[in-house]
Image: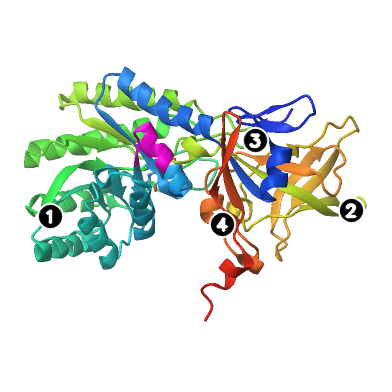
Amino acid sequence: MPLLFGTAVFNEEQHLTIGGCDTVLLAEKYGTPLFVYDVAHIRERARGFKRTLDSLGVKNKVIYASKAFCCLAMYQLLVEEGLGCDVVSAGEIYTALKSGMPPENIEFHGNNKTEAELVYAVEQGVGTIIIDNFYEIDLLSKILAEKNQTQRVMFRISPGINAETHDYILTGQEDSKFGFDVNSGQATEALERILANERLILQGVHCHIGSQIFSAEGFLAAVEKMLLILNEWKEHYDYTAECLNMGGGFGVQYTESDDPLAPDVFVKAIVHAVKGQCELLNYPFPEIWIEPGRSIVAEAGTTLYTVGSQKTIPGVRHYVAVDGGMGDNIRPALYGAQYDGFLANRKSDEPKELVTIVGKYCESGDVLIKDISQPPLQAGDLFAVTSTGAYGYSMANNYNRNLKPAVVFVENGQDRLAIRRETYEDLTSLDM
Ligand SMILES: *Cc1c(COP(=O)(O)O)cnc(C)c1O
């Protein structure tokens, strides 16, 4: 059985439908490859995080991590659902602002924000800048002095936690390019320097321990570590954090073997841990911020491809090629990410065979799904790869001068274009 998420179902014609829209008709209308986003699923995830935090009676902010997938339509959805966003470049700030995202609901991350980006963020009134390193403290201080302005900030702590993750995407460990290390005293020095600067209004501390995390243990360890250091700072510096930002990284399901906790279970575990530690240490309960990215959009996204050529090497492998690949989904090539996929345009009762789904790019590593059991696929078939909503389009590229696909949002039987397909003209529009 294929993995179906959100509103995805097969209709009587055995066509995959998402958001009440027949994917066969979507493919005809918009062409393939095509990203289809189940808007109801995005809304449900966004609301779910908010609902869980509110139901636990904690002051909170849910801030979507833009890097998973962003465009004007996505930001507009977030605005409708009352979420903020985290951004990691001036380009993301620009897009968020253009969509109508209130600047105060934007928080700016990154380990090497440029001076121009920081100036832009300050000028646009970005809500929170999350300081990552000493260089940034100095750079931001200089900018604020020149403009005679203040800025709300947090700073990122690398708590030295090795979170369990299936995706080799660790960021919270000691040896990380992100944030101030606790064990060597850097985090405490950062606190001193930020507190000493009147233009930096410190809202609290941030950590992000990694991505595609399946269990709560890493978060619990991080909460414990963060509150220990906060409590130390309360005693030595009389500093109490107003907000504790625990980052994102909540895992999602790509294939049947993935078994992450449900989003609300992660959130409850974090809140209970913070409550427990605060009571233990007699520390004032902080506002809790979270930054889910993947867990809001991954399962909402499906990529539709058209099957083309095939190659069988007897006794070795049967390759089935589709009309996209590493240009629209680089994750399998980049870090061995696994996906599920299936025939989306017809029913087949023929016996299944083991195939490897490859793309059309000039790299042997352009493999989307290795060794998956499928009924015989034919040229012209529609092949759906599920759970492609995060880090797919946002990492899309023009390798081989292939066009970036279109992105369509579907909801209640309606489809609307969120990002149009690139044209050959777009491809040469920057060439001189
Ligand atoms: C990437 C990132 C996130 C989101 O991670 P997901 O795995 O997509 O939930 C949140 N916060 C920070 C700082 C990040 O770098």
Give the residue at mark 4.
Answer: 396
Q: What range is drawn magenta here?
A: 76-84
- Where residue 283 appears, as percent x and y from the top left, is 16, 27
Q: Earlier in the sequence, mark 4 or mark 3?
A: 3
Camera-near label (1 vs 2) is 2
Residue labelled with disc 3: 255
The residue shown at (41%, 27%) is 47
The residue carrying mark 1 is: 193
Report the amino acid beneath label 4: Ala
Graded by Cα atoms within 10 Å as few (under 14), some (14 to 19) or many (20 or more), the crowding at tag 3 reads some
Answer whether labels 1 and 2 touch (C-beta < 8 Å).
no
> Label 1 sits on what residue type?
Arg
State the separation of the CA atoms marked 3 and 2: 25 Å
> What residue is pinned by disc 2?
312
Quarter of the image holding residue 37?
top right
Q: What element does badge 2 sit on?
A: strand
Marks 4 and 2, how far apart at CA: 29 Å
Number of the front mark, 4 or 2: 4
Kindly state the secondary structure of the residue where label 4 is placed: loop
Mark positioned earlier in the residue sequence (3 or 1): 1
Q: Earlier in the sequence, mark 1 or mark 2?
A: 1
Which of label 4 and label 1 is nearer to you?
A: 4
Amino acid at dot 2: Thr
Under circle 3, the secondary element is loop
Which of pointers 3 and 1 indicates the residue nearer the eye? 3
Q: Is mark 2 within 8 Å of ligand 1?
A: no
